[in-house]
Image: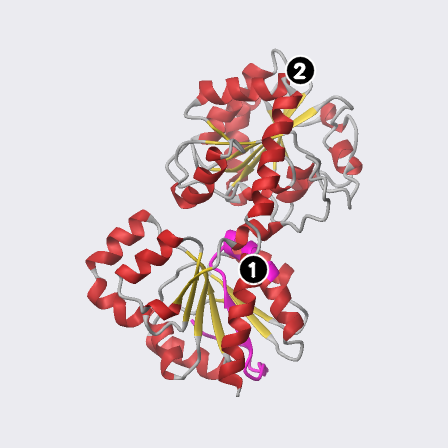
């Protein structure tokens, strides 16, 4: 509703908006670079989701403001922008807020879109209202887009050509590779032994992480896991639902499939074989308690820890892709040298998914059977797994640089308006 702290005094801050977790993670490097370049400036980082807000708080410095984007009503937008008085407004990816963009333009506050993309569905809808969108889009000072296809779509929507620059995808900049050998290993700067012990992973034990899962996918994953245990008894499973608040729902699904659920938030420093004494969570209905007599399945119900579990994993499935949710970011596990699998519904990450498949750097599975068989292949053939993750890391390395390009363009623009 645009209620900001009374004491707010930022003096022409730079405002970065990242709608949710993925966008917030993508702008980390950009924020870091701009914060160094403009050390005397304070920043505002806004999100729409609560999970994105938590990531933004981990990025921001002590004197920066982390808030939610005001609702796009003109009277709210005017109040917020007048009080915050930003000198520059940066939007991650392509979010079109007509009243916000229009008022920023009226106040002569430049708007820059970074990591811009236009999905197939969005483009179809935008073309239907092109006559309404064109004047709004041209109030944006600069579009830094991911691909040539995104650039062409903006031009078809009527954006002036000199406003559009193809700079690449900042999500490829998730990791700074300093190892010239590009070995397919997790990060060497941290020892994850303690984390492995907390999960009770044996020396030869392996961890299968199913990340960013949605309703309908957990059931498939658990059935695949049950089959895999027949041949790989030391395999452990961690499910990280896309929305951690679904942890209770996932617990019920785990129990229904004969496993014992355990939330990561409840580890509390325990190590080794603690899960052998595991009790059923009190939140679980009594009618399904009796089914929980099998292997422990871990549920990641916290924010900001997924990368740690990617680092100790052996195989990663990225969800939102076996159901029609559009998929999620495969670059994070791939950057840590983990072989990655995903389903056919990757339309939100289509370009990245196509690039990985073209370079044999990830594995596409269409159903439960294919997922089971492909995981078996990776578990039984370590050299195959190594080949996939090496190709993935080389691919990421070859596509890095978007963050630096975007920062350069932003600095050039900011220098002009600061004169």
Residue 198 is labelled as none
Quarter of the view holding residue 332: top right
Q: CA distance from mark 2 to mark 1?
A: 43 Å
Which residue corresponds to mark 2? 233
Q: Position of residue 28 (x, y in %)?
A: 60, 59
| Residue count near mark 1 (Cα–Cα under 10 Å), binned few <14, some 14–19, many ≥20 | many
Q: Position of residue 250 (x, y in %)?
A: 52, 33
Left or right: 366 with respect to 11?
A: left
Which residue corresponds to mark 1? 403
Whether residue 17 appears in magenta in the rendering, the answer is: yes
Identify which residue is drawn at 22% across, 63% down.
Answer: 130
Quadrant, the N terminus: bottom left
Identify which residue is drawn at 77% across, 42% down.
Answer: 188
Residue 162 visible in the displayed image:
yes
Which of the colour schemes (rainbow, by chain, secondary structure, one colour) is used?
A: secondary structure
Residue 282 visible in the displayed image:
no
Identify which residue is drawn at 38% across, 42% down.
Answer: 347
Q: Position of residue 191 (x, y in %)?
A: 79, 40
* Helix, strand or loop for disc 1: helix
The span picked out in magenta is 1-29
């Amino acid at each position: 509703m645009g209620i900001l702290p009374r004491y707010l005094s930022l003096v022409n801050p730079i405002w970065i908006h990242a709608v949710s977790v993925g966008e917030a993670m993508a702008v980390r490097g950009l924020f870091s670079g701009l914060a160094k370049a403009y050390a005397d400036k304070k920043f505002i980082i806004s999100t729409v989701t609560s999970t994105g807000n938590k990531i933004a708080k981990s990025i921001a410095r002590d004197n920066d403001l982390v808030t939610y984007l005001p609702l796009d009503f003109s009277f709210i937008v005017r109040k917020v922008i007048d009080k915050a008085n930003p000198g520059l407004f940066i939007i991650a990816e392509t979010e079109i807020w007509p009243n916000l963009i229009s008022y920023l333009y009226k106040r002569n506050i430049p708007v820059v879109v970074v990591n811009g993309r236009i999905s197939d569905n969005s483009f179809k809808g935008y073309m239907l209202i092109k006559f309404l969108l064109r004047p709004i889009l041209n109030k944006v000072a600069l579009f830094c887009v991911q691909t040539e296809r995104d650039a062409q779509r903006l031009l078809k929507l009527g954006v002036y050509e000199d406003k559009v620059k193809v700079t690449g995808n900042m999500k490829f900049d998730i990791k700074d590779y300093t190892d010239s050998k590009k070995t397919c290993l997790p990060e060497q700067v941290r020892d994850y032994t303690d984390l492995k012990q907390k999960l009770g992973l044996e020396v030869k034990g392996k961890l299968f992480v199913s990340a960013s899962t949605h309703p309908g996918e957990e059931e498939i994953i658990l059935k695949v896991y049950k089959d895999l245990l027949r041949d790989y008894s030391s395999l452990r499973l961690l499910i990280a639902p896309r929305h951690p608040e679904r942890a209770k729902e996932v617990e019920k699904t785990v129990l229904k499939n004969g496993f014992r659920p355990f939330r990561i938030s409840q580890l509390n420093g325990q190590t080794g074989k603690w899960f052998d004494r595991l009790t059923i969570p009190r939140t679980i209905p009594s009618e399904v308690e009796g089914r929980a007599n099998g292997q422990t399945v871990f549920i990641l119900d916290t924010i900001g820890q997924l990368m740690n579990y990617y680092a100790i994993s052996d195989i990663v499935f990225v969800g939102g892709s076996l159901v029609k949710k559009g998929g999620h970011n495969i670059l994070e596990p791939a950057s840590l040298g983990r072989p990655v699998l995903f389903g056919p519904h990757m339309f939100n990450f289509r370009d990245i998914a196509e690039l990985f498949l073209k370079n044999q750097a990830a594995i596409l599975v269409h159903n439960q059977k294919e997922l089971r068989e492909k995981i078996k292949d990776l578990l039984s053939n370590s050299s195959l797994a190594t080949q996939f993750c090496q190709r993935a890391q080389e691919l990421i390395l070859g596509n890095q640089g978007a963050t630096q390009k975007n920062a350069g363009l932003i600095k050039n623009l900011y220098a002009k308006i600061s004169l």
